[in-house]
Image (cartoon, rainbow, N blue to C red):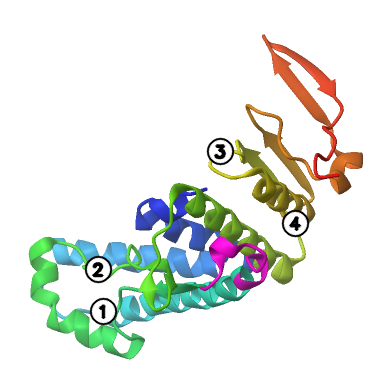
Amino acid sequence: MQLLLEGEPGLRRRFVDWNLFHVEHRFQSVRARYRRVAAQRNAWLKGGGGGKPVWDLEYASVLSEIAALRAHLLGSLARAFQQVARNYPAAQGLSLEWRSGLPAAVDIPAWLDSHLDADIARGYSFLSSARGDFHFFQDSMAWVGSRGENKLVGILLQLAAEQVVFEQIGERAVWLIDDLGAELDRATQEKLLAQLINAGDQALVTSLDEPAIPTPQARTTAVFHVEHGAVAQTDPAPDRSE
C-alpha cells in the first residue's frame, strides 16, 4: 500500500486511470483516441516533421481532455479522503493535490508549436499523458511520511477511491489485504479492518500473525490457519479490548 506514495509517478497515474475507467465511461474511448493521435504525431516527428503540423490541434485537444478528467477525479478523491481519514491523527491536516505537468489547456497548441523543433529532434512529443502526479501536502509543504504513515495513508486513499466508485456506480469492491499488521499498531489495524470490511462486499485477509478482526464482524468471519500445508478453520480471536 505504501508503494502508492513511495513508488514512481507512473504507479500513481495508473491508480488514477484505473479508477477513472470505472467512474467515467468515456475515459476508455478518450484514451484510445489519445493513443491513436499520439502514435500518428510521433511517427510524423520521427519522419522529420515535414509539412504542416496537422496533428497538433487534435493532440492538444485530447491531451487536455485526459488532464481534465484526471484532475476532476482527484478532486473527488481529495474530498473522500478527508472523510475516511478523519479518525486517524497521523492523516490530519493532509491535502491531496494533482499536478498535471502540462500547460493550461488553451496554451498547449502554442507550446507544441514553440517546441516543435525540439520534438522533431527527440522524435516524440515531450508533452504526453505520461506526465502528472499527485502529492499530499501539509501546511502548504510536501508531506513525507514514515513507512507506517505511508502505509496508513495509502490504505485510506484506496478507501477513498472505493467510496468515489461506489457513489458513481453503486458497486462494492472485494478487498485483498495482506500483512496489514506490518508497521501498524493493533488499534490502527482494528480500525482499518473495520472500515475495509464495511466498505466492500467481501474482504480476504492474509497475515503471518493473527489479524486484529473487530468483534462486530466476528459473526460473519471465517478464519483459516495454514501450517505445514494443512488448512484448518478456527474461531476468530476474541476482542482483547473488552
Q: Are marks 1 and 2 in contact (CB under 8 Å)?
A: yes
Label 2 and label 3: CA atoms lie apart by 47 Å
Looking at this rendering, what residue extends furthest in the bottom direction? Answer: 106
Position of the C terminus, as image quadrant, is top right
Q: Earlier in the sequence, mark 1 or mark 2?
A: 2
Q: Is residue 25 above or below residue 52?
A: above
Q: Position of residue 108 (x, y in %)?
A: 28, 83
As measured in the structure, the alpha-carbon distance from the residue carrying label 3 to the one carrying label 1 is: 49 Å
Q: Which residue is mark 3?
A: 182
- In the picture of the structure, the residue carrying the numbered disc 1 is 56
Q: Give the residue type at disc 2.
A: Arg
Q: Is residue 129 visible?
A: yes
**As shown in the figure, which amino acid type bears the numbered disc 4?**
Ala
Question: Upstream in the sequence, badge 2 or badge 3?
Answer: 2
Extreme front residue here?
242
Q: Amino acid at mark 3?
A: Ala
Disc 4 target residue: 199
Mark closer to the chain start, 4 or 2: 2
Q: Which mark is residue 41?
A: 2
**Residue nearest the viewer, comparing 27 with 141:** 141
Tell me whether the residue at label 3 lies in contact with that at label 1, contact meaning CB atoms closer than 8 angstroms. Answer: no
First to last magenta residue range: 82-93
Drawn side of residue 14 relative to residue 217, left or right: left
